[in-house]
Every structure is written in structure tokens, then in C-alpha cells.
Image (cartoon, grey):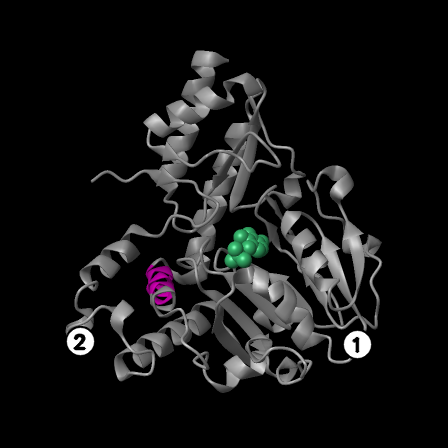
């Protein structure tokens, strides 16, 4: 068996310790005689797995008691509609920050439900920056303010948390659990699990209690946060195995010193990779320095004719899935929590060697 360093943007690498534990527990979970995949979600074994995962998640993110944690399906993309359905609460308009491809999708979906007021639009910069909040054109009567703290495709991450008097909503799909977050500043935080929390099929939403129960009653039952809150995310069959894997990831984070421990490693990994890019004329990253993502690091080769060879040789060196998003080109190294620092070191060494041979 030989495993590669997997720089995929998502579904992404999982901690090896998590995969090994899942392997050990695959055929017989804790003497139950069955796999977690085969368990009734209403049985005592699975209920304990689900409850432990939520408790660990609450602990590592320091989630206050007046927030509910919902384990949902439909991906972050379903939250693009669940957020307006639940948070408009009779209002006609909501504020959105447009900083990249994912916030663009959130805006497009929001428009199906309300007047979307785009408070800041950085498309002119090809989404390589975040505008200072003082220049935003916010509406004090907005139902909520939606933003994307980390834009996965271009690699732009907010260096600040927006200040607002309306409920703040964040799509943290690609940077949840990577750095400390003051949950009390938010109305809703949501994230698909497949980048930094586990496997595809699960989406976690952290929702302030007072925002639950005021969804448009004409909307489908499954789109109402209250349905899931009232039933501990078991109104229907939840994505049981993905929920279990997320639980293993939460335990692994605890073993790494919690979010503080992980954040320090993430900071070091990103800093050394950007330093290597900046030190060379062969590679470049177009993102404004204060807004560079710690999780997704796109970089371009000065000579794009070498892109194919770079990917081919990188793959031979055990560095996988470095091709950039088709809308950006070049390369993208996604270095989520599960990417060990040695993987980043190996990438940097490969980049320097490639430049020596082809620069
Ligand atoms: C990947 C991603 C999404 C889409 O997530 P799905 O779970 O596939 O719906 C949304 N927002 C961000 C920031 C992402 O990185």
C-alpha cells in the first residue's frame, strides 16, 4: 500500500489515524457485531456515536448553549436556499458579500427568495481580494448578512469577521475547524463535511436558537431548521456513516491540541508554501497578501506550457491532485487540516527541484 500526499480541494484527504480507526471498526463496531453502516440510526449504539460526535464538535468549537448543531444532507449548496427560507422571516431583502465562485452561487440562490443586496463585489479583481468593510453598502434592514470566509477556488480568506447588527451567516465549507472562531458572532455557520470535517454526504449547520422556527410555512418540511432541531437531526435517516467519520475527525482534532493546536500547524504550513512561491519568479500567486487562504493555495507557473509536465512529475513524486480549478488554471494545493506538514515540505522541495530543472 502506498498513499500519496493528496492536495484535492474536496472531497479531500482524511487524517490517516481516522482511516485506520474506521478500518479497525469496519466489520464490528465495539463488539456490536456490525459495521456502523449497517446500524439503525435509532439504535442505542448509533445514538451514542451521534451524541459523542456532537459533544466533541461543541467542545472543540466552543459552541455556546444557545446554538443548535444540525447534521444535514444536501451539501452546503442546499444551505444556499435553507438560509433564506429560515432567516428571511417576513423581510424582503438580504445582504451578500460577493468574493468568489461560491458566494456567487449563494447570491444566485438567494435571488430566488428575496432581493439580494450585494454589499461588495470583487469580481473586477478576478476575486483576488476582500474589500474593507468600511466601503460596503449594507442595508440596516436586511434579514441577514451572508459571506464566504474562505473562497475555495481562488484561495481568498477573510482576514476579519464582518461587524453587523443583523444575523451573520457564514459558508465555512472550506475552512471550518482550521482556525478558532467566535461562534457567538454568528447567526448561522454551515459547512459541507468533505473538505475539512469528513466525507461527502454530510453538511453541518450551527444555528442560533432564536432563529429557528420562523421558516416560511409554504416551504418543504425538510428545508425547515426546526424539523431537524426538534428531532436531533433524525427526522429522517441521517447520513449515518459520514456523521460517524466526522466524529472520528473531531476526536483526532482533540488529539492534535484542539483547534489552537491545528491552527498553529496550518499557519506554519501556509506561510512556508507562500514564502516558497514568493521567493521565486517561476511561480506566482495573485491574491492580495492579507487575504491569502491558509487552506487553498493556488499558484501559476510563469511558463504555462510546463503545467502538464509539472502535474505529471508531481504525480510521480507522490504529490496528487494539484491541478488548479478550470476557471483559474495553473495549480492549487489544498492543505486542509489532514495534510501533514511533511506533505507541504515535500511539495516545496518538488517545486524547487522542478524550477531548477526547467527554470
Ligand atoms: C465545496 C464548497 C461548497 C459546495 O459544497 P457542496 O457540499 O458540494 O454543496 C460550497 N461552498 C464552499 C465555500 C465550498 O468550498
Q: Position of residue 332 (x, y in %)?
A: 51, 36
Q: Is residue 65 visible?
A: no
333 relative to 109 in the view: left or right = left
Task: Give the label on residue 250, or none.
Answer: none
Location of residue 301 by image quarter? top right
Image coordinates of residue 48 in percent, x first then y, are: 31, 79
Task: Kindly identify the residue that appears in the image at 78 percent across and 52 percent down.
Answer: 120
Q: Was residue 227 drawn as part of the magenta stretch in this picture?
A: no
Q: Closer to the camera, 344 or 188?
A: 188
Q: Measured from the top left, where is residue 204 in percent x and y?
A: 49, 68
**Quick check: can you spot residue 274?**
yes
Q: Which mark is residue 91?
A: 1
Q: Nearer the viewer, residue 19 or 353?
A: 19
Placement of 226 over or under 132, stated as above or below: below
Measured Cα–Cα span from mark 1 to mark 2: 50 Å
268 lies above or below 212: above
The rendered magenta stretch, by its main secondary structure, is classed as: helix
Rendered view: 330 above or below 17: above
Badge 1 or badge 2: first in the primary sequence: 2
Residue in view at x 57 percent, y 78 percent? 225
How busy is the neighbourhood of tag 2: few (under 14 within 10 Å), some, or many (20 plus)? few
Classify 181 as above or below 339: below
In the image, is 120 to the left or to the right of 295? right
- Identify the residue position indicated by label 2 in the image: 32
The kind of secondary structure element at disc 1 is: loop
Residue 207 falls left or right of residue 235: right
Q: Which residues are magenta?
A: 245-255
| Residue that appears at 67% across and 74% down | 85
The quadrant where ligand 1 appears is: bottom right
Amino acid at each position: 500500500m502506498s498513499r500519496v500526499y493528496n492536495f484535492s480541494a474536496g472531497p479531500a484527504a482524511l487524517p490517516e489515524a481516522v482511516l485506520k480507526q474506521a478500518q479497525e471498526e469496519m466489520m464490528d463496531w465495539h463488539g456490536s457485531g456490525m459495521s456502523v453502516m449497517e446500524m439503525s440510526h435509532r439504535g442505542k449504539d448509533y445514538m451514542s456515536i451521534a451524541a459523542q460526535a456532537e459533544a466533541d464538535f461543541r467542545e472543540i468549537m466552543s459552541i455556546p448553549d444557545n446554538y443548535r448543531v444540525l447534521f444535514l444532507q444536501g451539501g452546503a449548496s442546499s444551505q444556499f436556499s435553507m438560509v433564506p427560507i429560515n432567516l428571511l422571516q417576513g423581510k424582503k431583502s438580504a445582504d451578500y458579500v460577493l468574493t468568489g465562485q461560491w458566494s456567487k452561487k449563494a447570491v444566485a440562490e438567494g435571488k430566488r427568495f428575496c432581493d439580494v443586496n450585494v454589499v461588495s463585489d470583487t469580481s473586477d479583481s478576478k476575486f483576488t481580494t476582500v474589500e474593507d468593510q468600511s466601503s460596503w453598502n449594507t442595508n440596516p434592514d436586511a434579514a441577514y448578512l451572508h459571506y464566504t470566509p474562505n473562497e475555495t477556488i481562488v484561495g481568498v480568506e477573510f482576514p476579519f469577521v464582518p461587524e453587523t447588527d443583523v444575523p451573520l451567516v457564514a459558508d465555512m465549507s472550506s475552512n471550518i475547524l482550521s482556525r478558532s472562531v467566535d461562534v457567538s458572532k454568528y447567526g448561522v455557520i454551515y459547512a459541507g463535511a468533505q473538505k475539512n470535517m469528513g466525507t461527502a454526504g454530510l453538511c453541518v449547520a450551527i444555528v442560533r436558537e432564536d432563529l429557528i422556527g420562523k421558516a416560511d410555512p409554504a416551504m418543504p418540511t425538510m428545508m425547515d431548521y426546526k424539523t431537524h432541531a426538534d428531532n436531533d437531526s433524525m427526522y429522517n435517516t441521517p447520513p449515518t456513516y459520514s456523521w460517524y467519520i466526522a466524529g472520528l475527525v473531531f476526536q483526532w482534532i482533540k488529539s492534535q491540541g484542539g483547534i489552537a493546536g491545528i491552527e498553529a500547524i496550518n499557519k506554519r504550513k501556509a506561510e512556508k508554501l507562500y514564502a516558497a512561491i514568493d521567493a521565486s519568479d517561476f511561480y506566482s500567486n495573485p491574491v492580495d497578501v492579507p487575504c491569502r487562504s491558509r487552506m487553498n493555495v493556488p499558484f501559476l507557473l510563469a511558463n504555462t506550457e510546463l503545467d502538464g509536465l509539472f502535474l505529471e512529475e508531481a504525480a510521480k513524486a507522490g504529490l496528487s491532485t494539484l491541478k488548479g480549478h478550470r476557471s483559474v488554471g495553473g495549480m492549487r494545493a489544498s492543505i486542509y487540516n489532514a495534510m501533514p506538514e511533511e506533505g507541504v515540505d515535500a511539495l516545496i522541495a518538488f517545486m524547487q527541484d522542478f524550477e531548477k530543472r526547467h527554470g
